[in-house]
Image (cartoon, helix red, strand yellow):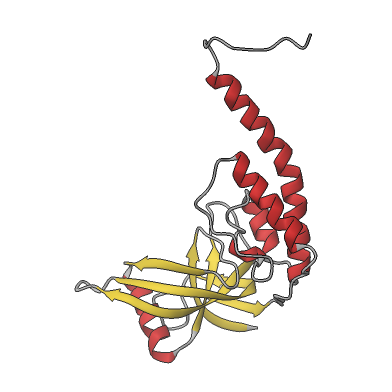
Amino acid sequence: MDMIPAFPLSIIAFPGETIKLHIFESRYRQMFGEIEERNTTFALIPYYENRKTTVGTEMKLIRIIEKYDDGKLDIEVEAIAPLEVHKLLSKYPNRLYPGAEVSRLPWNDEMDRLSNPDLILAIHKLYSIMNISNVNIKDSSAFRTHQLAHKVGFNLDQELEFVKISTEEDRQTYMLNHLMRLLPIAEEMKTLRKRAEMNGHIQNLKPPF
């Protein structure tokens, strides 16, 4: 178990994901200044009002995009590994920013090549139903579930569960099962939307006989 700087934020980060952040509070400017100087990592801990989470993500600072005259920062960070959060402290020892007692959880990125085509097909079906065309989906050999885990309709509980799944094969199964449940619902919503749009319009329907 380790004590590392903590950044509570209302997002969940999956290993391999990169995020750009604007840092304006003085305590977090101090934190990222020390992280840059010492080349250390920090814990991004999902924080939602009235909800305690026991999972987070270890993050590393990739670069400081811009330093403003008033001390604010634009930064880019990358998620490394999931964390079990044992304790979140309002202040890291002798610092202004929070800290957390954490231990690292396993994360394996080796995927099942036979499952990826089915998973990618299901994602394409969902995006076709939802009329989504601006999401880049990598080919079967390069696709990993974390790349689209924020874009397949997971709710908060599902994202928190997903980040705790240690193997890519199990994450593939989890995501595919979710999509198989979601696709019929999405189809029904598409039909409902079409019916709502037809309200008051003259319908050109062909009788069956």
Q: Position of residue 153 (x, y in %)?
A: 62, 48
Residue 109 relative to residue 6: left or right: right
Residue 175 relative to residue 56: left or right: right
Classify residue 29 by image quadrant: bottom left
Q: Is residue 68 above or below residue 93?
A: above
Residue 71 relative to residue 41: left or right: left
Q: 26 and 117: which one is in front?
A: 117
Q: Position of residue 142 (x, y in %)?
A: 64, 71
* Label tally: 0
In which quadrant is the C terminus drawn? top right
What is the residue that sits farthest to the front in this orientation?
209
- Residue visible at 70% across and 53% down in the picture: 121
Q: 162 and 96: which one is in front?
A: 162
Q: Position of residue 181 (x, y in %)?
A: 75, 44
Q: Position of residue 188 (x, y in %)?
A: 68, 31
In which quadrant is the N terminus drawn? bottom right
Classify residue 139 by image quadrant: bottom right
- Residue visible at 58% across and 71% down in the picture: 57
What is the residue that sits farthest to the bottom in this orientation?
38
Classify residue 96 by image quadrant: bottom left
Q: Is residue 143 above or below residue 35?
A: above
- Residue visible at 66% across and 79% down in the picture: 104
Q: Is residue 75 above or below residue 184?
A: below
